Image (cartoon, rainbow, N blue to C red):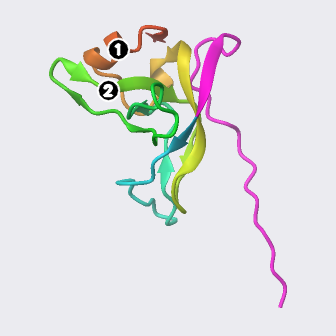
Amino acid sequence: MSKFTVTNYTNKKEILKFPDHYVNVAVTLDATGITANAEGRKIVPAGTILGGGVLADPSKLAKKATTGTGTTDAEGVLFSDTDVTYGPAPAAMLIHGFIDLNKIPVAPKPEEVAALKQITFLK
């Protein structure tokens, strides 16, 4: 019985408006609360606003930002699609740059835009 691996070669989803000017930090993305897609994979899409206190404490897991009226814990934006099917996974969180609003899944809320002072969202 032979085993083989299937590799899907696809283009990376680009969320940047100007891809030559950005800063990312390494984070570990939390898998809690992520729903599996039709293929059974838990994919967190690029452009998801992240929070969870990872900038102050890198040992914490990055997770989708919690935003309410006038408050948010937003710290950055997920740089590329990340698969968390098998649990927490390494990811890149953008903390400085220019993001194309037409390329992210959900537009950021005003509180998130205000909190992400070094990220500019453009159409």
Q: Residue at x 40, y 31 (%)?
A: 53
Nearer to me, 64 or 57: 57
Instruction: Please state if 57 lies on the left or on the right of 89 as rendered.
Output: left
Q: Residue at x 45, y 48 (%)?
A: 30
Q: Which residue is mark 1?
A: 115
Q: Earlier in the sequence, mark 1 or mark 2?
A: 2
Element on which disc 1 rests: helix
Q: Which residue is mark 2?
A: 73
Nearer to me, 33 or 13: 33
Instruction: Please state if 6 lies on the left or on the right of 72 as rendered.
Output: right
Magenta segment: does it hold 7?
yes
Image position of 59 with respect to 100: above or below: below
The residue lying furthest to the left in this view is: 69
Magenta range: 1-26
Q: Residue at x 52, y 65 (%)?
A: 39
Residue type at the position of mark 1: Ala
Quarter holding the N terminus? bottom right
Q: Quadrant of residue 8?
A: bottom right
Magenta segment: does it hold 123?
no
Image position of 60 with respect to 57: above or below: below
Cα distance between the residues tagged 1 and 2? 8 Å
> Residue 40: percent from the left, percent from the top?
49, 66
Element on which disc 2 rests: loop
> Residue 108: percent from the left, percent from the top?
34, 22
Nearer to me, 83 or 53: 53
The residue lying furthest to the right in this view is: 2
Q: Quadrant of residue 32?
A: bottom left
Q: How many residues crowd mark 2 within 10 Å: few (<14), some (14–19), many (20+)?
A: many
Residue type at the position of mark 2: Asp
Q: Quadrant of residue 18?
A: top right
